[in-house]
Each structure stands twice: as structure tokens, then as C-alpha cells.
Image: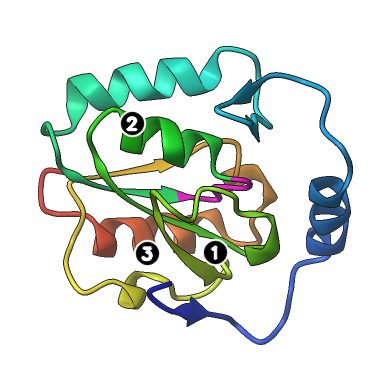
Amino acid sequence: MEGTANTGGETPHLDYYRDALAKPHYGPSYRGLPIQAFQGLHEHVAALAGDLFPAGGRVLDLGCGRGALSLRLADAGFKVSAADAVAEAFGATKAVDFSAADLNGDFSNLYDAPFDGITAVEIIEHLENPRHFLRQCKAAVKPGG
């Protein structure tokens, strides 16, 4: 775990999210980790990452949930770091570096070097300030990333 960022105040959605992650999941999964996204979305994002990010590059998966996409990206050869507000739900700990982070706050300073690419799937609509989130993403990615 690289670090923790927190703004000091959790979003109203966080308790709902924590409860949802604690419930059994009966839908699709990737290597045993539940996929909590629209069907086929993780496959599509992984294919885009393969086209857009350099092979073996550093990728940051934000709002990673249980880690299914993070693990899929690691299996595709990327060096993956992941971040989410609910650390106890993350299940890809052996393959992916994880940081507990409030994505409404300043999280780009958790990482020592910029990333080649960032994924943020089905998360931005849950954030208090999407523009701040995008500014933090820009600060965490290499120029042109």
C-alpha cells in the first residue's frame, strides 16, 4: 500500500457503496473478483488500454472497487496501482499495489512517479467535484499520457 489520502469528510454515497461491496455478488467475475460494471465494459477498457498505453507501462486504476479491472490490466502486462475509498473490499492484493484514497481529495501526491495511463471506470458520477478529480488525474499522469 503506497499511502492514504483523505479529505476528512466522506461522501454521502460511501456508506451505500461500502454496504454494496459487503453483499454477495452473483454476477460476472474476473478470476474470482466480482465485476461491478456494465457487462463487457472491463473487457473494452482493457482492450483500449492495450491500444493506448505503452506495453508494460504504469497504470493507475481509480475507483477500483474489488479490483477485477486492476487484475485484468496486471494480467495484460501493465504495472498497476489501484485506489479506492473502501480498502477492505479490494481483492487483488497479490498482483496490484493498492492505496486507500478519497478520490474527492488530493490523491495524486500518493505516487512517486507519473503514470503512463489512468483508468477510472464508473466512478466520476459518484464524486463531489469531477473537475478536481480530473485535475488530480492530470497531475498523476505523464505528459501525453
Residue named by callout 3: 136
Inspect the image, locate mark 2, and give the three-letter code of the amino acid beneath it.
Asp
Q: Quadrant of residue 68?
A: top right
For label 1, the SS is loop
Q: Residue at x 78, y 62 (%)?
A: 14
Q: Which mark is residue 75?
A: 2
Nearer to the camera, 37 or 11: 37
Q: Nearer the viewer, residue 27 or 14?
A: 27
In which quadrant is the N terminus drawn? bottom left
What residue lies at 44% left-to-right and 41% top-to-bottom? 70
Callout 3 amino acid: Gln
129 and 139: which is toward the camera: 139
Pointer 3 and pointer 1: residues touching (CB < 8 Å)?
yes
User: Label 1: which residue?
Assistant: 103
Tell me: residue 89, above or below residue 30.
below
Q: For the magenta stretch, what is the residue range? A: 62-66
Q: How many marks?
A: 3
User: Between marks 3 and 1, how big is the CA–CA gap?
Assistant: 9 Å
Q: Which mark is residue 64?
A: none
